[in-house]
Image (tube, coloured by chain):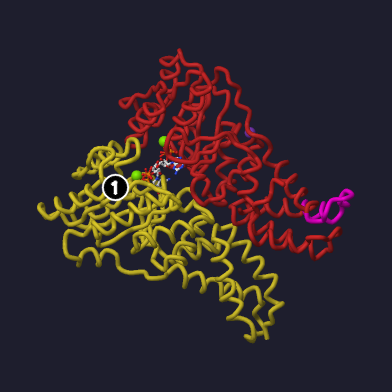
Chain colours: A yellow, B red
């Protein structure tokens, strides 16, 4: 029979391992609590050590968290009424604009036409950056002058797509921190006015404990359908995936794995769990 | 006391010591645990937290509080001293002609910081110029140019040139009139060998007096590897922490300072060119311990 005290050491080690992988602390503690509850009182076979049983339970617990809400993204877009409007949100510099460029390529490969609409009317060089991506990918960009109303640009994008039979509108937003009440209110307004078919939250794999706070705040302001986790090539930890899936209850859909247009992959929960547990091939 | 704004759980366990003049082993144990929690939630490197907390534990157990000092204040003093010992004072930035190069991960805030630092130097009466060597990121030239216009400082870049080393060389020549040269570089990470080679080439042409690692306050445990690689390749003399206007605590900077044997130079607290501050240890330590 497994007793509370048998679990102390293995669970402490697991907690440290999860923190080293950037899983947020309260999320790590809740995951460990489910393991504790599940295992206390279980009988263990002669052959198994408590440590082995704990790591099996951890694998299952992580998988449960990280595979939350997975759906067939391609099918959902394919079957939706056109144009499908997708808005990208997230804090500063995580890779929203680059991910939009990658998604334009992704949809093209699946036979869907796209336009880009630049709702970042704030940051220096934002129009030039996304225009360059649009040129490289041979896509149309709808943009307004710096200082314009972001909701209006995105709305124009949708109207253009309707008039020209475009399948998907990829709408960018300016980076903002969740502590800025004004900018978060602006995001709510965009969500209300544009009423997108999908909102994708973009965050980076290199993020640590803060991933929980910001994903929660963004999900509250403009409810998300899923997450794109970028810069996975820069980081072998990936605990941010756990934190974000746990607090938002929404699936991680894509991984950004570099700066080129093809550097985007469908997210695979099983592979991420193995990576977190250091069991990668 | 400097550490008045402590996180509530840490304060709770310290408050239990109120009125005590000696610490029991359990007291120390509990406080050390709370300190670990605070630092780990601030993204300080796990092994660094363990090292720090064991020296805190050792000192709290062994050192007698000086006469008249309560146990609570004694522990606080030890914690503060250990953290200050690690973080140190702000990186020295002489107000004289010099060249500073910025490096760091994609999106960490280098280009914004370049313009902010130029603004900062211009307020100190020096004439700064920013040289943009990022030939990779679309719109990098326009972004830096517009930020420098906002900061009202000199700027050099060449949107048609593909070789960052050449831009660096020409940029320094063209902005010869400036006192302070701030060289921006493209984002890159520790695992990209060819880009690490590239920044070494830029560095050897620029020959900076100081190379700063620009770190997002929200960076997690990866801070250690990034800091080590950048230090190995170009030598890091200081750290800039950006996006401190959010909720991230910036503990990655503590890791980076420890890893590169350097210090923190500037803090970024917003998107405009004025949103820059010199580093100041007290406020940062309070933040790490979770205000
Ligand atoms: N290594 C790596 N870099 C990436 C990835 N995705 C984006 N980047 C880089 O990250 C930097 C920031 O990307 P952007 O797309 O401008 O980020 P953003 O979220 O739109 O930024 P703001 O609009 O300023 O908030 C750029 O240098 C990109 O090339 C990725 O998956 N891997
Ligand atoms: N809120 C806030 N945003 C910041 C701060 N510093 C930079 N940013 C934002 O972070 C994003 C990325 O900043 P950049 O200066 O483009 O970062 P970079 O390191 O030059 O990016 P790359 O050149 O792509 O590697 C932009 O949206 C900036 O406006 C800061 O201190 N606070
Ligand atoms: K150094
Ligand atoms: Mg952007
Ligand atoms: Mg830049």
Q: Residue at x 86, y 51 (%)?
A: B65
Instruction: Check residue B63 for magenta coloring.
Output: yes
Q: Is residue A63 visible?
A: yes
Q: Is residue A232 visible?
A: no
Name the one closer to the observer, B19 or B80.
B19
Name the one closer to the observer, A202 or A54.
A202
Instruction: Check residue A56 for magenta coloring.
Output: no
Name the one closer to the observer, A110 or B11.
B11
Q: Is mark 1 within 8 Å of ligand 1?
A: yes
- Residue lying furthest left in this view? A163
| Drawn side of residue A79 relative to residue A14, left or right | left
| Drawn side of residue A86 relative to residue B70, left or right | left
Q: What subunit carries mark 1?
A: A
- Residue A60, image x, y percentages: 51, 74
Q: Quadrant of residue B259?
A: top right
- Residue A168, image x, y percentages: 20, 56
Q: Label 1 crowding class (10 Å Cα cut-off): few <14, some 14-19, many 20+?
A: many
Q: Is residue A192 above or below residue B279?
A: below
Q: Helix or strand or loop: what does disc 1 sit on?
A: helix
Q: Which residues are magenta?
A: B55-72
Quarter of the picture for ligand 4?
top left
Q: How many marks?
A: 1
- Residue A65, image x, y percentages: 47, 70
Q: Is residue A184 above or below residue A137?
A: below
Q: Which residue is mark 1?
A: A101
Q: Residue at x 51, y 16 (%)?
A: B179
């Amino acid at each position: 029979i497994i007793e509370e005290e048998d679990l102390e050491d293995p669970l402490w080690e697991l907690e440290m391992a999860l923190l080293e992988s950037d899983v947020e602390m309260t999320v790590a503690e809740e995951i460990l609590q489910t393991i504790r509850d599940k295992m206390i009182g279980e009988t263990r076979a002669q052959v198994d050590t408590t440590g082995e049983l704990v790591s099996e339970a951890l694998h299952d617990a992580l998988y449960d968290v990280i595979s939350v809400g997975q759906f067939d993204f391609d099918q959902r877009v394919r079957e939706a009424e056109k144009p499908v409007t997708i808005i990208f949100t997230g804090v500063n510099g995580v890779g929203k604009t680059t991910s939009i460029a990658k998604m334009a390529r992704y949809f093209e490969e699946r036979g869907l036409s796209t336009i880009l609409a630049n709702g970042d009317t704030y940051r220096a060089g934002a129009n030039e950056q996304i225009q360059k991506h649009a040129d490289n990918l041979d896509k149309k960009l709808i943009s307004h002058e710096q200082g314009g109303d972001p909701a209006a640009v995105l709305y124009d994008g949708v109207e253009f797509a309707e008039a020209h039979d475009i399948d998907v509108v990829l709408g960018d937003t300016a980076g903002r921190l969740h502590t800025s009440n004004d900018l978060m209110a602006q995001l709510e307004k965009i969500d209300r006015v544009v009423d997108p078919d999908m909102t994708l939250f973009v965050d980076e794999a290199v993020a640590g404990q803060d991933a929980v706070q910001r994903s929660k705040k963004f999900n509250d302001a403009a409810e998300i359908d899923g997450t794109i986790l970028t810069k996975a090539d820069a980081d072998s930890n990936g605990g941010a995936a756990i934190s974000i899936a746990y607090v938002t209850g929404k699936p991680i859909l894509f991984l950004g794995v570099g700066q080129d247009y093809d550097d985007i992959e469908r997210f695979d929960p099983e592979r991420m769990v193995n990576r977190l547990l250091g069991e990668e091939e | 006391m400097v550490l008045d704004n402590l996180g509530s759980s840490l304060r709770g366990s310290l408050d239990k010591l109120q009125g005590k003049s000696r610490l029991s082993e359990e007291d120390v144990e509990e406080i050390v645990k709370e300190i670990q929690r605070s630092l780990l939630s601030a993204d300080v490197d796990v092994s660094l937290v363990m090292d720090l907390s064991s020296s805190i534990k050792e000192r709290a157990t062994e050192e007698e509080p000086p006469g008249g000092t309560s146990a609570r204040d004694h522990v606080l003093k030890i914690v503060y001293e250990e953290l200050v010992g690690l973080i140190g004072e702000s990186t020295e930035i002489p107000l004289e002609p010099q060249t500073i190069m910025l490096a760091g991960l994609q999106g960490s805030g280098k280009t914004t910081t370049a313009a902010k630092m130029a603004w900062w130097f211009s307020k100190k009466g020096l004439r700064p110029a920013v040289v943009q060597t990022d030939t990779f990121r679309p719109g990098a030239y326009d972004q830096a140019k517009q930020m420098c216009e906002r900061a009202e400082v000199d700027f050099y870049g060449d949107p048609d040139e593909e070789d960052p080393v050449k831009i660096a060389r020409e940029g320094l020549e063209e902005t010869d009139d400036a006192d302070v040269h701030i060289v921006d570089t493209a984002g890159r990470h520790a695992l990209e060998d060819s880009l690490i080679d590239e920044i070494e080439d830029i560095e050897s042409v620029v020959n900076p007096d100081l190379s700063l690692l620009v770190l997002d306050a929200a960076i997690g445990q990866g801070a250690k590897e990034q800091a080590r690689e950048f230090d190995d390749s170009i030598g890091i003399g200081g750290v800039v922490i950006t996006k401190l206007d959010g909720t991230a605590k910036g503990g990655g900077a503590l890791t980076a300072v420890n890893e590169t044997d350097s210090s923190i130079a500037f803090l970024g607290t917003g998107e405009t060119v004025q949103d820059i501050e010199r580093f100041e240890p007290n406020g940062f330590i309070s933040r790490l311990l979770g205000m």
